[in-house]
Image: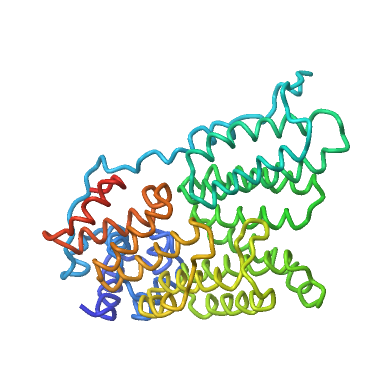
Amino acid sequence: MSTGNIGQRIKDLRRARSMSQADLAAAMTRSESWVSQVERGVQPVERLSVLQALADALGVTVRELRPDTVTEPEPADNQPESNDLDALRVALTGHPALGSLFGEVAEDLPSSVDDFRADVEHVWDLAHASSYAALSERLAVLLPRLEAAVRQPPADRRRELHALRARAYQVAAASFVRQDEPDAAWVAADRALQAAELADEPLEVVASLFRMAHAFMRQQHIEQAEYAASAAVSVLDPRSESPTCPPEELSLLGAMNLVLAVIHAREGNRKASHQHIERARAIAARIGEDRNDFDTEFGPTNVELHAVSTAVDLGDAGLALDEAEGVDASGLSPERQSRFLLDVARAHAQRRHVGEAVAALIEAEELAPEQIRTHHLSRGIIRDLVQLSGERVPEQLTQLAERCAVS
């Protein structure tokens, strides 16, 4: 069945249930413009998970929506495995250093800010490697120690400690987003923002907003995500016109443009998404190299990774695969490389290329097993691939599904 016929079918079913496009959009947690584009055949609908969500919103089966789709019921107990961030979540609970309000003095704290700095760098290394179990264990200890240290003498080191607190909470926020815990990510990002302001570090404030925007996106609070990213861009854009604008600031501006590109892609706004990708490309070209300012890994390569990802979000699988052919992500972190391969797998799944999608997922798993085995996108792709395979599920896919607790 063609995409256009699916669009007409969706429109007919919606009208038969006296639903407006806005009603269907709300039920889908999508934009009204996305629904309009689907019904007009502008926005392709290929992923089985999206078809299932549409069917649920319209009160029909996927087969009624698209007769050529093979679906199987998903077991009720098919829940993700633990993502190993439980200790970190507990560390975010309550007041971060309650004892200090009652005069308690924390013992055995590092005497040097440099020791804290080394600890923060280490947990960021773990995040870039997608080693979430180790990260959770280290960060659950580090955060309370930082919170205690900043409340104790000497006062002259507090600004530096606040800056390190900001970075530590940023890594917590980034990890929670990647492991599908956006509520905890929002809390961590908000604490990072407050710490960055106390440190009098405006760029760390922007970096914290970057993490907050990602938390909002994962919560499907698209308007808030767009507001956070747009606010940062509106301040940084005029400053970037100066020929002496530092690369660190340009990196944040570029990263925020990539956030906006993703937001618009998920809303089905192809033009706006492409505009922000092109703006990010221009900024990356000006910087001239892959960097990792504020742990954003912004640079020419990361822009191309986002070009692939947004193309997949827009349903342009062919374009995504063409773009991916020219990308060498080997210089980026395992987390970024595995996420790129995850997007390649998504594109192949849209084209119903089961073998190629499985190969990309397995390569991604080799790079960052914790990320792939718990990420909501990888689990969704695996489900789609199993359904696409029908009764002849490849052995590699069966084993991958078992490792990711997808049945």
Q: Quadrant of the N terminus?
A: bottom left
Q: 382 left or right of 171?
A: left
Residue 75 x/y as whole percent = 22, 45
Residue 172 x/y as whole percent = 58, 44
- Give me the residue at 28% from left, 81% from top: 4
Colour scheme of the rendered structure: rainbow
Number of numbered discs visible in the structure rendering: 0
Q: Quadrant of residue 141?
A: top right
Q: Residue furthest front?
A: 331
In the depicted structure, whether residue 366 falls above or below residue 270? above
- Give me the residue at 28% from left, 60% from top: 52
Q: Quadrant of residue 116?
A: top right
Q: 175 left or right of 55?
A: right
406, 66: nearer the viewer: 406
Q: 159 left or right of 40?
A: right
- Give me the residue at 24% from left, 61% from top: 385
Residue 192 x/y as whole percent = 68, 46
Q: Quadrant of residue 389?
A: bottom left
Q: 315 left or right of 1?
A: right
Residue 206 x/y as whole percent = 70, 58
15, 243: nearer the viewer: 243
43, 65: nearer the viewer: 43
